[in-house]
Amino acid sequence: MPLIETEEAARRLARAIASDLSLYNEEKIVRGIESDTLFEEISEEIEEGRALYKSRVSPDLYQRNYYDRAVVDILVRSKGHLKSKLW
């Protein structure tokens, strides 16, 4: 499979991976946000997603942090309604 070479496709992939993380780890995410341990709760899953993302995009696009931004947007911002020390 060829590497992704466009920003739009790289962003889409990053958001798809982060969405899957959210979908399949909802309980861990909620627990992590409520106890301010989100990144400890799902560190393995985030790193697995990062490895997948890195394997699919060009090195130049990987360096632009689209994956990290997608993780924050989808796993953190979308849970703004939860009670947390974070906000």
Image (spheres, rainbow, N blue to C red):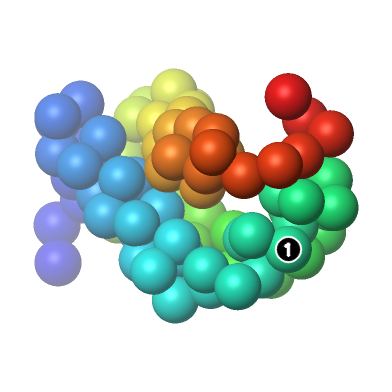
Relative to 87, residue 75 above or below: below
* Element type where label 1 sits in the image: helix
Image point (51%, 55%), residue name: 50
Relative to 20, residue 24 above or below: below
Image spot of residue 10 (x, y percent): 24, 38
Pick the front one: 81 or 26: 81
Image point (75%, 57%), residue name: 32
Image spot of residue 11 (x, y percent): 26, 35
Q: Amino acid at mark 1?
A: Arg
| Location of residue 73 (image quadrant) | top left
Q: Is residue 76 left or right of residue 9?
A: right
Relative to 28, residue 6 above or below: above
Q: Is residue 9 left or right of residue 76?
A: left
Pick the front one: 55 or 42: 42
Image point (83%, 45%), residue name: 36
Quarter placement of the N terminus: bottom left
Image spot of residue 47 (x, y percent): 62, 61
Quarter placement of the C terminus: top right
Dot 1 crowding, Cα within 10 Å, few <14, some 14–19, many 20+: some
Q: Is residue 65 left or right of residue 3?
A: right
Image point (55%, 34%), residue name: 80
Question: Is any part of residue 72 visible from this angle?
Answer: no
Name the residue carrying label 1: 31
